[in-house]
Amino acid sequence: MQHVIPTTLTFEAMIITHKIFHSVLGPVIVAWNGREVCFVHFGDSEQQLLALLQGTFASLDSSPSHERQPNWDNVQKVLERMIEGRTGPAQHTVRLHQLGTPFQIKVWEHLKCIPSGEVRSYQEVAQAIGHPSAVRAVASACARNNLALFIPCHRVIRSDGSLGGYKWGLQRKRALLTYERDSRKGTYQGISVTGDIGETAPSGGK
């Protein structure tokens, strides 16, 4: 079962443990707050990923796991399959935990419903969640996602077909969309992914 938890809950006295593995798109860090995955990020180095983790959970104790994490092998396998476009977040049983406002949670839950190999525009997501004028807020929610792939914000692009932004780099976003498209053997649906490759974060998209 997947869990996205609102900001009303706290992390008092919680210890975050983490592991790093190397994927075809670079190092990936996975962190747990007990039995739930609470942080999944791409990075360019292990040092960068550890700094990102510490910056996100600055008030918590964070340490590498020297013990077998619950379902670690399964989590890594699921992430590797998602990177390669061979599975989607709806097909896993990993427990997730992410803080967010009610609006952000609504966006993230909708993103999990976008099938692998398809994309939606920021405008389409805003309309789908009942806030058609909140395009910039949708882009902001995508940028604040701390669960790469499990919350597939890479599947949200601009209405003109350009990529928009991606907090883990547009080269990774393009690669993920390409892998997913190829895995569907030419049955790619949605907006053509071309054009804007110069941005590194959502800029309000349309």
Image (cartoon, grey):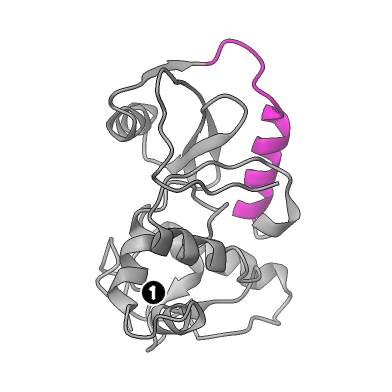
112 horizontally vs 143: left or right: right
Residue drawn at point x = 53 percent, y = 41 percent: 97
Residue drawn at point x = 27 percent, y = 74 percent: 204
Task: Return the residue at label 1.
Answer: 163
Q: How many marks?
A: 1
Indicate the position of residue 138 as horizontal and vertical percent values: 37, 70
Q: Callout 1 environment at 10 Å: few (<14), some (14 to 19), or many (20+)?
A: many
Residue drawn at point x = 47 percent, y = 44 percent: 98
Q: Can residue 122 be seen in this view?
A: yes
42 horizontally vs 202: left or right: right
Asked whether 9 falls inside the magenta stretch, the response is: no
Q: Is residue 107 above or below residue 12?
A: below
99 horizontally vs 182: left or right: left
Q: Which amino acid does label 1 sit on?
A: Leu
Q: Give the range drawn in magenta.
A: 65-84
Can you say which quadrant of the picture contains the C terminus?
Answer: bottom left
Indicate the position of residue 46 as horizontal and vertical percent values: 39, 28
Point out the residue furthest to the front here: 8
Between 186 and 18, the residue placed more toward the observer is 18
SS for tag 1?
loop
Asked whether 72 falls inside the magenta stretch, the response is: yes
Residue drawn at point x = 31 percent, y = 32 percent: 48
Q: In this view, does 171 lie above or below 51?
A: below
Indicate the position of residue 71 as horizontal and vertical percent values: 71, 29
Point out the residue furthest to the top here: 66
